[in-house]
Image: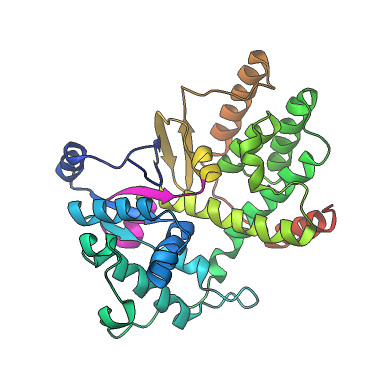
Amino acid sequence: MNHFHYSSELGEIALPNQQKLTEISEKNEQPIIILDSCVCLDIITLIKHKKSARVDKIKIFNLIEYIQKNNIEAIPIFALIELCYDKSTFEIQEDKLWDIKNKIDFALKYPIKRLKKLNFDYNQNFIPSKNPKLLVTSIAPLASNLNLYYAGLLKIREISNNGLKNELAEKNIQKFIQWMINLDLFLGLEYSLALAIFGGDSKLRSMIKLGSTPEKVIKSLWGSAWDLFHARISCNAPELNKIFQKSTYPIFATRDYALYKLMAPHVENNIRYNSSKLTLRTKNEYPKHYSSEFINELNKTILQTSVDRIDKPIIYNHSKINSIIRELEAGLI
């Protein structure tokens, strides 16, 4: 069946069948589907343009049918935050947010048989209700995280500009690891991305926009930083449990293939301690540019680095990160 890409804390997954849903329920967990911004935009486009919408309608219909059939909660909250803030002030644009959310809610609740036939008129069929007051009106609290992920992407791109030949792969990934160590942090998804790009995986290069103008790079990498934020929060059950005040089984839905492949490797276990998480994977297929001996030593280094700092709280040096960003942006070519 034609579907979007789905991931959980254990990597790539299929939407749970009835047996799996029963198992989740028996654990007193509630399955929730976190919608990526690209999925939300596809749904909105379908509602606005119907037959002329240039989106994969089958994927949208299949997702909505699954949600309605199994009474699953679909949540666009993080996508709404990304899509509805003023980039100069970080203030959330309430009117835009509620307009998008209303269209998504309409699509998710409208009878799927009629939706498939495009037998609807949003302006007539949608019954508006009073929108509640937003408890959060700015994304400023997220700026530290986003800046950190953005800085990591800029650094990967800077190293990539020095060359991505086979013989440079091991030196490149060591440079990125040392950069993280110097900042006294470890960025797991960015490390996985760097390992893949430096190792010869061309499919993930789209996330760092090699060959683009500085203006396009900045815009695109900021979008990729949001993607990495979505990926982290949308599969983090303990954090989501706090946000939604219930025990959840989160599933992240995206049509972004690069982001999906970054999250896809099978995870054997997640070890959490305070704000840190150590992910254990045993079925990795490493990029072709690395020798098996190098990978073995690299894994030992990463494991030791992770263990050494797992009990250390993440402390953001805002001025240092901002300075790094300015320097890396100035060096864009």
Please tell me whether residue 252 belongs to the stretch shown in magenta: yes
Identify which residue is drawn at 40% across, 28% down.
Answer: 268
Give me the residue at 40% from left, 79% from top.
Answer: 134
In percent of width and height, residue 274 lies at 44, 46
At a point 76% along the width and 55% down the height, the residue shown is 324
Judge by depth and name the residue closer to the eye, 112 or 171. 112
Is residue 137 rendered to the left or right of residue 66? right
Q: Is residue 135 visible?
A: no
How many marks the image carries: the answer is 0
Q: How is the image coloured?
A: rainbow
Toward which corner of the image does residue 87 lie, by quadrant?
bottom right
Q: Is residue 218 above or below residue 281?
A: below
Tell me which residue sits at (34%, 58%) in the image.
Answer: 242
Q: Position of residue 98 (x, y in %)?
A: 40, 78
Tell which residue pokes out farthest to the top in this image.
293
Give the quarter of the figure containing the N terminus.
top left
Across and down, in percent, residue 64 comes to 29, 56
Task: Tell me, yes or no, whether the highlighted magenta stretch contains residue 91.
Answer: no
- Where is residue 90 drawn, in percent x and y? 58, 74
Residue 286: image quadrant is top right
Residue furthest to the bottom = 130
Q: Nearer the viewer, residue 38 or 193?
A: 38
- Residue 17 appears anywhere in the view: yes
Residue 54 vertical position relative to residue 154 in the rendered view, above or below: below
Magenta segment: 238-256
Establish if 267 lies above or below 21. above
